[in-house]
């Protein structure tokens, strides 16, 4: 009973935290059309997680990582990725002449989501050893590439202003490639941490 209550309490905190951020982001977004496009990811992903949780319940850590990424994503949807205020500050700190929020989120896509993806494959397909690291890395790589293609496709068919805001390339012709590279780097970093942790703690579940 104690474990059940702890899980429900944690899930409630995560859900409420995300809902608060989402409501804030939905109030007078800078570009409504871009907000709507960005939230397609939210409208698809969260119902899938909710309606399948009885068949596949993630670990609390995975739910936390997913929630953090989705919160960062909806913050980007409020301002557009290219116009998040503290992204400019981050760019200045890194010596870049662009808003770095989109780069940060693409990096964190790999950092935060490779672990839940790894959990799915370990628990359903029963992969282990080398494959428990290689498969999640390749899935993150594939998803980051697919997202870039979706961005391009959406930009081609929607209002031009919304398309430019959705792409968020900020004039960089190699923006998509850099974003995909950052997702890979982020995934490798997390997988490296997991590998080291498992070497130290042999009984770690994942």
Image (cartoon, rainbow, N blue to C red):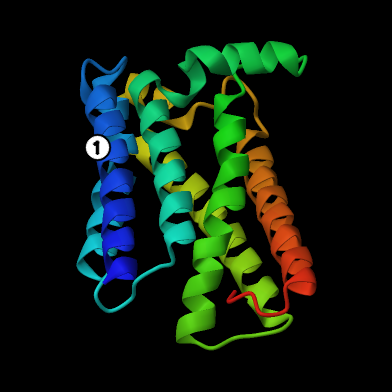
Could you tell me which quadrant the N terminus lies in?
Answer: bottom left
Q: Residue at point 62% right, 74% down?
A: 135
How many numbered marks have been drawn onto this rendered protein structure? 1
Other residues around mark 1 within 10 Å, as few (<14) / some (14–19) / many (≥20) = few
- Kindly give the residue lying farthest to the bottom in the view shown: 126
Whether residue 97 is visible, yes or no, is: no
Give the SS element for disc 1. helix
Q: Nearer the viewer, residue 167 or 26?
A: 26
Q: What residue is drawn where x is 73% and y is 53%?
A: 189
Residue 83 on image: x %, y %: 47, 15
Does residue 158 sit above or below 32 in this rendering?
Answer: below
Location of residue 59 (image quadrant): bottom left
> Residue at coordinates 64% horizontally, 74% vertically from top-left?
204
Quadrant where the image shows the C terminus: bottom right
With respect to residue 96, does 145 lie above or below? below
| Residue at the front extreme of this rendering | 2
Q: Camera-side residue: 133 or 205?
A: 205
Q: Which residue is mark 1?
A: 19
Residue at x 63% of width, y 42% of height:
107
Instruction: Pick the residue in front: 79 or 144.
Output: 79
Residue 106 left/right relative to 73: right
Q: Position of residue 151 (x, y in %)?
A: 44, 41
- Left or right: 29 with respect to 68? left
> Relative to residue 155, is residue 42 depicted above or below?
below
């Amino acid at each position: 009973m104690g474990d059940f209550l702890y899980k429900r309490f944690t899930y409630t905190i995560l859900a409420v935290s995300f809902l608060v951020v989402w409501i804030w982001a939905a109030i007078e977004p800078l570009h409504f059309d871009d907000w709507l496009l960005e939230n397609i990811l939210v409208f698809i992903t969260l119902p899938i997680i909710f309606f399948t949780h009885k068949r596949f319940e993630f670990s609390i850590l995975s739910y936390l990582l997913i929630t953090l990424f989705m919160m960062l994503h909806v913050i980007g949807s409020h301002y557009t990725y290219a116009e998040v205020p503290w992204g400019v500050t981050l760019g200045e700190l890194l010596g870049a002449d662009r808003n770095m929020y989109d780069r940060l989120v693409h990096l964190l896509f790999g950092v935060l989501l490779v672990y839940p993806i790894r959990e799915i494959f370990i628990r359903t397909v029963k992969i282990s050893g080398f494959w428990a690291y290689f498969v999640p890395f390749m899935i993150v790589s594939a998803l980051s590439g697919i997202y870039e293609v979706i961005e391009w496709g959406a930009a081609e068919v929607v209002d031009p202003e919304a398309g430019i805001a959705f792409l968020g390339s900020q004039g960089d012709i190699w923006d998509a490639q850099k974003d995909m590279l950052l997702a890979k780097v982020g995934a490798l970093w997390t997988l490296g941490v997991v590998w080291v942790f498992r070497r130290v703690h042999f009984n770690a579940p994942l």
